[in-house]
Image (spheres, rainbow, N blue to C red):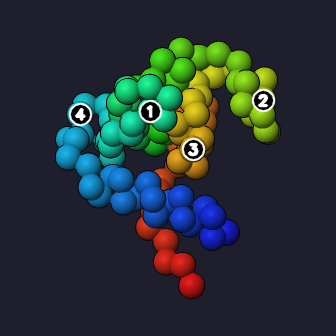
Amino acid sequence: MNSALAVRNNAVAELIRQSDLPDNKRWKNRFKIHSETSGRVYIISQNKFHGHWGCSCMSWRVPKFCKIPGPNYGKYGRYCKHLTALGLPLFEQPYEVQRIRLK
């Protein structure tokens, strides 16, 4: 695993650890993030049953064709810039965050 991915994993793991949001019936590992472009607060969380990550922003809630440059460009599904910024996978791909020691 490269060090950039390890740093992102550790950052997400720390956000989860510091969060005071409880799990609910469908979502676990819930934490808040603040928008960089507005005063909104979004909740990032992991689906308990399928293991994918989601966001409360409108961009993630409404499936569409991806406009983010890169390997997912043009792919249809759920995505948002908040998950991308945290290094979490898009399009409802399962992913487990683990704290990783950097050497």
Q: Amino acid at mark 4?
A: Asn
Residue 6, percent across and down?
56, 66
* Quadrant in the picture for the N terminus: bottom right
Query: Can residue 75 be spotted in the picture?
Result: no
Q: Is residue 61 above or below residue 95?
A: above
Q: Amino acid at mark 2?
A: Tyr
Which residue is denoted by mark 2 in the rendering?
73
Secondary element under disc 4, as helix, strand or loop, is loop
- Residue drawn 63% across the image and 64% down it: 4
- Residue drawn 63% across the image and 22% down it: 77
Of 25 and 70, nearer the camera is 70
Question: Where on the picture, by quarter, is residue 68?
Answer: top right
Secondary element under disc 2, as helix, strand or loop, is loop
- Residue drawn 67% across the image and 69% down it: 2
Comparing marks 4 and 3, which lies closer to the viewer?
Answer: 3
Of 100 and 42, nearer the camera is 42
Which residue is denoted by mark 4 in the rendering?
24
Q: Earlier in the sequence, mark 2 or mark 4?
A: 4
Comparing marks 2 and 4, which lies closer to the viewer?
Answer: 2
Which residue is denoted by mark 3 in the rendering?
85
Which residue is denoted by mark 1 in the rendering?
35
Q: Earlier in the sequence, mark 1 or mark 4?
A: 4
Secondary element under disc 3, as helix, strand or loop, is helix
Comparing marks 1 and 2, which lies closer to the viewer?
Answer: 1
Q: Earlier in the sequence, mark 4 or mark 3?
A: 4
Label 3 Cα crowd, 10 Å radius (few <14 / some 14-19 / many 20+):
few
